[in-house]
């Protein structure tokens, strides 16, 4: 039985604490679209996406109105294009990206993910062609997002792919320099990438998925922060319990929306991703949650411990609320999208090295971080290698979304607008990593990969 206090509490969460469903993402398989003819392939892709996702936005809006739950984004993810277009050259890959962009516009969605390649152990000609086309594809499209998986715990780390991605990121930054190098905000490099993640820029529809699925990403850092404010004298065990209970309530709302979207669209329900996804709005910050635990400023000593507690409690609470939790599920720490992170970075309390340490215990990785535009490609690759190693050794997902902001220096600020927010340009180390990156090859899989 639903208690009136529960209803009032949920209304307050929505009205005052920034609680929302961050995204309803429809995953679509494109394997049945494959053709050797680029024109036919593009037609097949466009037709399938618009047929299946044509009512996605309307359905999301109907659910939002009926239940009074804000649903911020309606999105689509597709099979990694490198698997669908293996025989295509880079120009043809860009044509496919433009087709995805047209389909996204026709459906009224803001992002479509899946311009992706899986190269954790090696790289086919098609995968190389897709990666080489990424800068042009992200420059000439508005809604397309791209991801590249360069490592898994089972396979090890493809250093050749990481070296390549440093140059790809630099080129993307240059080509989109008129817009704050925003192309890099739509490009993410992964280790142990999940195949059902609904959040951009890393979403794609995995090879183990069915023809179509509905995946929902919830949010709610503001709700957790508000709950902790009401318990200023709680000990750390009590704080963990408060977070678990709050995560349960947030995830139940996501489960409701996912079930309704699945039913109305006639598409199987996939997962609820219970990640705490912040926004630049004041009061909707993961950093502020950590500060409610007792830190003067996010990034100071104790930050990693507080984040570890938060991530664990969120997962435990969410797992009790849904039998199908997936994606990333935990706490995001994107600098540009979190008001508290932005403030801490501006004060130089939160540094790139500290963020790297924090990623060992949270859901994603070095996310939406602006660095000087003249940062060498080898340094970007080395930052990626460090972060990817954390994921591989710890058998978890990690990712890097760096923006070498063209023409910007340390202390400048780059603005992306909307939920992408703005980021202070953070310093990187001056010492070179060129020789390490240029060695190439594969970093072998760790001992804990041998679990068969």
Image (cartoon, rainbow, N blue to C red):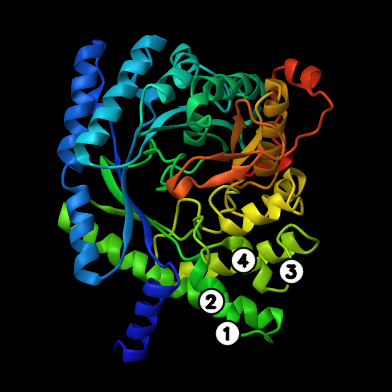
Spot occupied by residue 348 in the image (x, y as percentages of width and height): 76, 50
Q: Residue at x 47, y 11 (%)?
A: 125
Secondary structure at numbered mark 4: helix
Secondary structure at numbered mark 3: loop
The residue beneath circle 1 is: 230
Question: What's the CA distance linking mark 1 and mark 2?
Answer: 7 Å
Question: What's the CA distance linking mark 2 and mark 4?
Answer: 10 Å
Question: Mark 2 and mark 1 in contact (Cβ < 8 Å)?
Answer: yes
Labels 1 and 4: the sequence-earlier one: 1
Q: Residue at x 76, y 54 (%)?
A: 349
The residue beneath circle 4 is: 288
> In the image shown, does 28 or 106 lie closer to the viewer?
106
Labels 4 and 3: the sequence-earlier one: 4
Secondary structure at numbered mark 2: helix
Among the 4 quarters of the image, the one containing residue 375: top right
Question: What's the CA distance linking mark 1 and mark 4?
Answer: 14 Å
Q: Residue at x 50, y 19 (%)?
A: 175
The residue beneath circle 3 is: 295
Residue 450 in sight from this viewpoint: no
> In the image shown, does 308 or 168 lie closer to the viewer?
168
Labels 3 and 2: the sequence-earlier one: 2
The residue beneath circle 2 is: 226
For label 1, count other residues whose C-alpha is less than 10 Å away and answer few (under 14), some (14-19) or many (20+). few
Among the 4 quarters of the image, the one containing residue 433: top right
């Amino acid at each position: 039985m639903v208690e009136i206090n529960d209803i009032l509490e949920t209304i307050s969460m929505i009205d005052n604490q920034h609680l929302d469903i961050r995204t309803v993402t429809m995953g679509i398989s494109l394997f049945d679209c494959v053709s050797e003819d680029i024109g036919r392939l593009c037609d097949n892709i466009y037709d399938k996406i618009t047929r299946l996702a044509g009512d996605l936005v309307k359905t999301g809006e109907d659910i939002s109105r009926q239940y009074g739950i804000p649903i911020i984004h309606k999105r689509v993810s597709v099979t990694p294009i490198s698997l669908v277009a293996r025989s295509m050259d880079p120009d043809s890959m860009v044509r496919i990206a433009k087709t995805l962009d047209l389909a996204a516009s026709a459906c009224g969605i803001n992002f479509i993910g899946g311009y992706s390649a899986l190269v954790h152990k090696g790289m086919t000609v098609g995968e190389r062609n897709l990666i080489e086309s990424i800068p042009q594809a992200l420059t000439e499209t508005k809604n397309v997002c791209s991801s590249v998986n360069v490592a898994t715990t089972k396979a090890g780390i493809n250093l050749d792919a990481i070296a390549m991605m440093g140059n790809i990121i630099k080129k993307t930054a240059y080509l989109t320099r008129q817009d704050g190098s925003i192309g890099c905000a739509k490009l993410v490099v992964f280790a142990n990438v999940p195949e059902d993640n609904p959040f951009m820029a890393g979403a794609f529809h995995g090879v183990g998925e069915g023809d179509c699925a509905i995946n929902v990403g919830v949010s709610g850092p503001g709700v957790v922060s508000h709950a902790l404010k009401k318990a200023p004298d709680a000990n750390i065990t009590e704080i963990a319990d408060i977070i678990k209970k709050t995560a349960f309530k947030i995830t139940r709302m996501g489960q409701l929306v996912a079930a309704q979207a699945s039913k109305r669209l006639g598409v199987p329900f996939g997962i609820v991703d219970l990640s705490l996804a912040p926004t630049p709005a004041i009061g909707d910050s993961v950093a502020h949650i950590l500060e409610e635990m007792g830190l003067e400023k996010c990034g100071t000593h104790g930050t990693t411990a507080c984040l570890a507690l938060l991530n664990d409690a969120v997962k435990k609470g969410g797992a009790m609320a849904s039998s199908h939790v997936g994606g990333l599920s935990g706490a995001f720490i994107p600098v540009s999208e979190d008001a508290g992170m932005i403030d801490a970075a501006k004060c130089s309390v939160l540094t790139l090295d500290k963020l790297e340490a924090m990623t060992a215990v949270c859901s994603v990785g070095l996310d939406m971080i602006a660095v000087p535009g003249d940062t060498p490609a080898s340094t970007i690759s080395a930052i990626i290698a460090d972060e990817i190693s954390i994921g591989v050794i710890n058998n978890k997902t990690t990712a890097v979304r760096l923006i070498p902001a063209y023409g910007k220096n340390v202390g400048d600020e780059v603005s992306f607008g909307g939920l992408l927010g703005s980021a202070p340009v953070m310093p990187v180390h001056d010492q070179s990593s060129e020789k390490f990156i240029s060695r190439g090859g594969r970093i072998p899989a760790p001992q804990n990969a041998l679990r068969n």
